[in-house]
Image: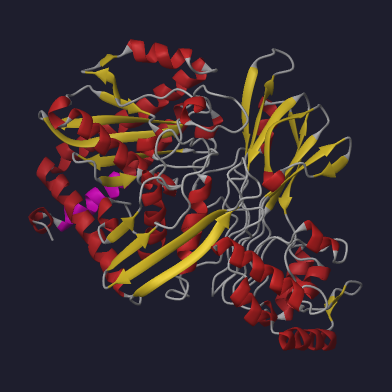
Amino acid sequence: MTEQSRAANPVVTELVRNGVIAVTEEMKTNLMRTAYNMIIYEALDFTVGLFTAKGETISIGLGLPMFIRGMAETIAAKLRKFGPDGLEPGDILLTNDAYITGSHLNHFTFSLPIFHDGDLIAFACCMAHWPDVGGTLGGITTDIYSEGLQIPILKYQKAGVVNQDLVDVIRMNVRLPDRAMGDLRAQLTAIKTGERRFLEMIERYGRDAVLDGVTAIMDQSERAARARTLAIPDGVYEAQSFMDDDGLDPERPIAIKVKVVVAGDTMTVDLTDVATQVRGFYNSGATTGRACAQVAFKCLTSPTDYPVNEGSFRNLNVVLPPGKIVSAVRPAPMRWWMTFPMTIVDTIFKALAPALPDAVIAGHHADLCIGAVTGHQPGSGELFLAFIGPLGGGWGAKRSEDGISATVCINDGDTHNSPCEQMEAKYPLLFERHALVADSGGAGEHRGGLGVEYVVQARAGITLNTSIERKNCLPWGLEGGLAGAGNEVLLRRGGEVGSEAPNAKLYSTRLAAGDAFILRSGGGGGFSSPLKRPPSKVLDDVRNGYVSADSARRYYGVVIDERTMRVDDDATAALRAEIAAAGPDLLSARFRQPPRRLTPAQRAERDPGHLPIACLLPTCCGGPRIWQALASDAARLSD
């Protein structure tokens, strides 16, 4: 405990705790109310925060978990460049350097140093997604230079005077400058709100009392995190998974291997063995690699402790060599930076499943499942950029309950999808369907959550890009639970539905008026053997449309009379006994790490309509051939 923490007034400390949360929430609200682009005011693709004069996190607005490090690292980099003596009241700093923020160039990060009586005491910061920052509009990029305008750490404003040359450079390099300038002003509103409200707290309670309170809050968070880490059994925990590909080589999966070491009250997350950076644009910077570890650690040790602050992570160590997919170095492309980290967080959870069986969840769909649409308005000819999603999908079940459905992936937390009605009003698109996907949740004693389907018709010619992952690496189950469905993209041309997307990725694909694209997010993995799920619950799922009667038989061993919608108890008991005798639970635990989507050849050998997930029937997937194939996949991925 620090001297400042000992000196802190406990009453003022609690006032400060709630005060900084209120400040960052007001910063969020003001940004949402003044932004020009839907991705900010509807999707909420941004975050805001308050930081100490050293760049330590005081409070960040609840929102995108993966931004947990981006702003703090950006402020630290700005301090290294200018130093505390190089800043003065009225300065506002800006950068979108992907290798500092850890993300892509679309994230413009504004920081405002907060002064009191001439002393630097804190920072207000806002990172928000701009839909366009120049660069190539579609396709896949292979270096950072083709992804848009790069702005090093600069002073957007110096002593109250705006750098108009910088503003002019930004306007000239974006396709929709008026909207960009609107979002810029909205971000300035947010950080000025943070400055004003933080100074009001200083004036109300006194500078030393507030800053001592901040220190005390961080120390309390550290003590709580250490105590909860002590409750985790010491040991070395490892797990692996994979990503489908890097967007350029669809036949080459990308290995994800993590190691977690728990020793006393400290945890080390070792990402040394994740894949090296790739040619396609799925890389992210080291800031995001550290954020992967912090998000997983926060979820497991202090998920409801607020504000989110630096103290919560003092007993977490991260091993992350440069040049990995989450520590990429220049000039690696990073436009789709957010996808791989979600699976890394999921894999950390999987590694710790033996140590924390009551706290972790099975795998989730782990992708934003966004369709990026560009085109021109039929009437005016004006260029438009539309982002369909994030779709939301199924989350993994846990030991005590089913997974949640239709919920945004862990990377983006509080991010919202854009209302279909608003999208239809703004763009030449028609949303024919927005629904849960039956049979997408992984079977288990507790079922995984369900994915979501969008069917979107083009009402004028459009260009579609999807960069969706985890079609083949299915959301895994735990303790004998089965995998959930993977993410998927389909096209409908001339009334015929088919897949033209290797691994759910489409680049610069033209659709004519009347054509449609279909986005399907995956489900969550199941928890524990499906044979343990009460037949009455399976029947409820069938009645609700969550599980088909055929899947109830194949994946749960429950036989339902579709005419009467009742369980055939005798047939169910016999089928479950047959499945149990074949031993799929044992084989599942051994070979489904990570589970892989059935290949087209494997599905062709099965009944028409068989899901792309191995079932339990001994006469179908429960036989030796499919388990041998899954074992072969697992061995190939570990090579």
Q: Which residues are magenta?
A: 10-21
Determine whether 481 is above or below 73 in the image.
below
Determine whether 206 is above or below 344 in the image.
above
Quadrant of image for the N terminus: bottom left
Where residue 25 appears, as percent x and y from the top left, is 37, 42
Determine whether 462 is above or below 335 in the image.
above
Quadrant of image for the C terminus: bottom right
Render colour scheme: secondary structure
Is residue 355 shown to the viewer in this render?
yes
Residue 503 left/right relative to 18: right
Q: Quadrant of residue 184?
A: top left
Q: Quadrant of residue 216?
A: bottom left
Residue 571 left/right relative to 479: right
User: Who's the residue at 49% across and 38% down the image?
Assistant: 45
Residue 125 left/right relative to 259: left
Magenta segment includes 20: yes
Determine whether 54 is above or below 83 in the image.
below
User: Who's the residue at 45% across and 26% down the image?
Assistant: 34
Where residue 116 appears, as percent x and y from the top left, is 14, 32
Near-viewer residue (343 or 324): 324
Task: Name the main secondary structure of what is drawn in magenta.
Answer: helix
Magenta segment includes 464: no
User: Who's the residue at 70% across and 60% down the image?
Assistant: 597
